[in-house]
Amino acid sequence: MVSADTEEPVITVGVADRRSEAKGRFNGPCVIKEALSLSGLFHARAAASGIELFDEGGQLVAASPSIRLTAREGSTFTIFGVTIGVRFHWEREEDQTFQGNLLLAARGDGTMAIINEVPVEEYLVSVISSEMSGRAPGEFLKAHAIMSRSWLMAALGQKGSPGATVTSGQGPGELIRWYNREDHDIFDVCADDHCQRYQGITKIISGEAERAVRETRGLVLFYGDSVCDARYYKACGGLTENYETAWEDIHIPYLVSVTDWPEAHSPVTSEEEAASWILSSPDAYCNTRDTALLSDVLPGFDRETTNFFRWKVEYPRGELEDIIRQRSGMDLGSLVDLTPLERGPSGRICRLRISGTKGSIIIGKELEIRRWLSSSHLYSSAFVVSKVGPPGGLPERFILNGAGWGHGVGLCQIGAAVMATRGFTAPRILEHYFRGARIERMY
């Protein structure tokens, strides 16, 4: 267990990685090795010498394998064209502004990493404002601060663990893959959804996120003697999911399926129950059409996703064949069927058979299924399949009716925000989603 007198950590966040160049602006003086002060526009590029940094006049001011720029008090820096939502359906570029120090590190392959060095509590203010809107209910923001701090501290404690994991499944013709927290090599965490969204001070539009972080300073979730690896996502669809449905086959007591409502819903245990559940609209905290609340909770680009509790995707067979071929690198011929073989209690599929005229393959787990069946990602792997076509012939269309947005493990962000509007406190919200966890102060 970490002592309560532990100092607040300073972490490194990968804002962008494997870039051949970086362009931006120093908003106030930033210093290289206490000697040279820069402000205004800058341009950096990867070169044989490592990193070459140019000032706004085009003058070369530094050349080194790594360059560290220390921000003076009140100074910030802006990076132009940061990619957010990498490989997700909301992927786009933004200019983003950051507090703290800027590190430029050459990778040796003609690219560089753009890294922000920042204290944990400042990082968390940005995370809360980037993951959700700073106008969200205060108790929800406090719950998110504690949860995000817990995730970060658990991640820092797990440095050196494996990244993506592949197994052979339960027999030939299976590809079962899951993705652990990315173990980044030259920074602690990345700035995108694969870790936690971190978009600098760009999205901090109110003082609510800062207040939530300040009032929960140093508080984290513990289970036993360990900091909780507190997972979260946008919307569960009415039932949260077990950890092992999305990741390795181990039981984590505080990451188990719970009903997102006071009265319990029965878990999904068969294909008939999956269809009944997914094609219905049960009571759930995240089953909300309150557009005003969603506007206060979700960042602007997330509000573009309007049907998240229940959703529908239709593909002409040829289009889905092309997606599967491009995403998998396999030619299974004409697509015949998509057959769920195993689901978690929320209805999320963790083993799916894809059958074609040239062969078939079983894939999992939930994220791999979402990737194979979409040019970006399906909202979730909780879906049922229907086919349209002539009897005895090849399907002409595949229709996926689905539930929820994200992997479903841990806290349901939209559900938690609704709970806060109904008077639930931050501890009570966290207790609901992370059963058996307790809140303790780490520093």
Image: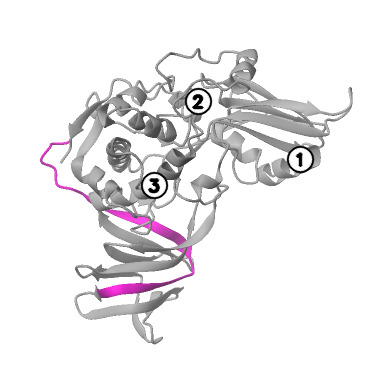
Check disc 1 and give the amino acid type: Glu
Q: Which of the two discs, 1 and 3, labels the residue nearer the N terminus?
A: 3
Q: Is residue 95 left or right of residue 383?
A: left
> Residue visible at 49% across and 23% down?
238
The residue segment tinted magenta is 1-30
Q: Quadrant of residue 334?
A: top right
Q: Where the N terminus falls, by quadrant? A: top left
Q: CA distance from mark 3 to mark 2?
A: 29 Å
Residue 137 seen: yes
- CB atoms of marks 2 and 1 within 8 Å: no
The quarter holding residue 397 reads top right
Q: 432 above or below 63?
A: above
Is 333 a magenta residue?
A: no
The label nearer to you, 1 versus 3, is 3
Nearer-the-camera pick, 381 or 400: 400
Q: What percent of the width, then of the height, locates residue 244?
A: 46, 25
Which residue lies under the disc numbered 1? 321
Q: Amino acid at mark 3?
A: Ser
Q: Which residue is mark 2?
A: 245
Q: How many marks?
A: 3
Q: Nearer the viewer, mark 3 or mark 2?
A: 3
What is the CA distance from the residue labelled 1 to the residue labelled 3?
38 Å
Q: Position of residue 125 (x, y in %)?
A: 29, 50
SS of the residue at dot 2? helix
Residue closest to the eye, 404 or 418: 418
Q: Is residue 179 left or right of residue 342?
A: left
Q: Which residue is mark 3?
A: 133
